[in-house]
Amino acid sequence: MPDKSDLKKAGLKTTVPRLKILRLLEESSQRHMTAEDVYRQLLDADEDIGLATVYRVLTQFEGAGLVIRHHFEGGSSVFELNEGKHHDHMVCVECGEVFEFFDPRIEERQNQVAAESDFCIDDHSLYLYGVCKGMKKNGKCSKKTV
Amino acid sequence: MPDKSDLKKAGLKTTVPRLKILRLLEESSQRHMTAEDVYRQLLDADEDIGLATVYRVLTQFEGAGLVIRHHFEGGSSVFELNEGKHHDHMVCVECGEVFEFFDPRIEERQNQVAAESDFCIDDHSLYLYGVCKGMKKNGKCSKKTV
DNA sequence: ACTATTTTGATTCTCATTATGATTTCTGGA
DNA sequence: TCCAGAAATCATAATGAGAATCAAAATAGT
């Protein structure tokens, strides 16, 4: 149930398309969506919002910190609501499902590694690609880990 | 100095374009190159190889395990020779330079995290984006780490 | 409600990459 | 060596995600 104040806080004026898109992001059963996904779900809900607007608004939301954009392997960008808790992702290459995780030791090592090279991190992305529990035929992991 | 045997081993027939591209990848001062980069460097060397061929061959090389393709934020794919030693990357958003690193503890934690979710990793990507030593104005890291 | 400003939506455009179809190059056997 | 068939290449066209354009519509402050 997003309202005007969420957009205001983000420094964006309140408009119908922005509210609809924000609401969709909050209420959809899918947490990770492409612009195309968002557009289709709006169409399904009989909202009359153009694809160009979806792209534009998602990009504005990203700039305002309302959503986070990810580039998973091989496809289009996906967006998720930014709930302030950083996390990384496992992507199932069989079913497309996305799982979130957070590991403080990984984060810590990243900072360490960067510090050792005098590299100043402003962002990072970590994606694990593989087969999720539900998609495993025999319950066993046959593939070698990198 | 790549020769026929490298292509043969990879299950690819020996052709002039494939040899030229492989040689370029080995000899170029740039280790991480886009298809466009490869194409331009071939042009500069007066090689008559089409852009489509460059894309096709790089994709074949990837399939054969000769090169690794990366998708850094915001741009085109970059390719690097696969020398068998897995590593991750730091990308300087100021100068574009790419630094490689390997941290066994990060790798270990990735496997651990995946195992905890019964997730079977076949691949992963970790990119750190930020400002490299050489590009830092005051020598200090002002930005907050994620 | 009135007006200046911003946003929208249809379309067009760009750019990376892939597909196509014709032509050229290899390859292996006669 | 010559030839047929296969495979690879080239130029070009097609695709698809995403950004830019611009007239029309919606918004915020008076």
Image (cartoon, coloured by chain):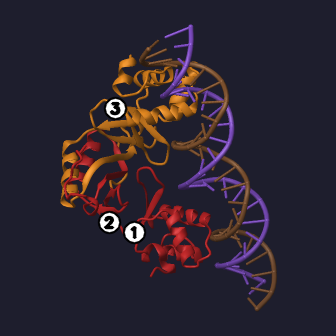
Chain colours: A orange, B red, C purple, D brown
Structural distance between the alpha carbons of marks 1 and 3 = 35 Å
| Residue A66 visible | yes
Chain on which label 3 sits:
A
Residue at 41% across / 53% down in the picture?
Answer: B72
Q: Where is mark 1, residue-wise?
A: B31
SS at circle 3: loop
Q: Where is mark 3, residue-wise?
A: A82
Residue at 35% across / 34% down in the picture?
Answer: A65
In the displayed structure, B121 sits above or below B80; it is above
Residue at 44% across / 50% down in the picture?
Answer: B74
Which amino acid, by three-letter code, is at mark 1? Answer: Arg
Judged left or right of residue A3, residue D27 is right
- Looking at the rendering, which quadrant does residue B133 occupy? bottom left
- Looking at the rendering, which quadrant does residue B84 occupy? bottom left
Q: Where is mark 2, residue-wise?
A: B85
The local crowd at label 1, few if under 14, some if 14 to 19, many if 20 or more residues have their Cα within 10 Å, is some
The local crowd at label 2, few if under 14, some if 14 to 19, many if 20 or more residues have their Cα within 10 Å, is few
Which amino acid, by three-letter code, is at mark 3? Answer: Asn
Quadrant holding the C terminus of chain A: bottom left
Which amino acid, by three-letter code, is at mark 2? Answer: Lys
Chain on which label 2 sits:
B
In the displayed structure, B51 sits above or below A120; it is below
Counting from the top left corner in percent of width and height, residue B69 is at: 44, 59
In this view of the protein, which residue sits in the foreground, B138 or A89?
B138
Counting from the top left corner in percent of width and height, residue A122 is at: 28, 48
Chain on which label 1 sits:
B
Mark 1 or mark 2: whose residue is earlier in sequence? 1
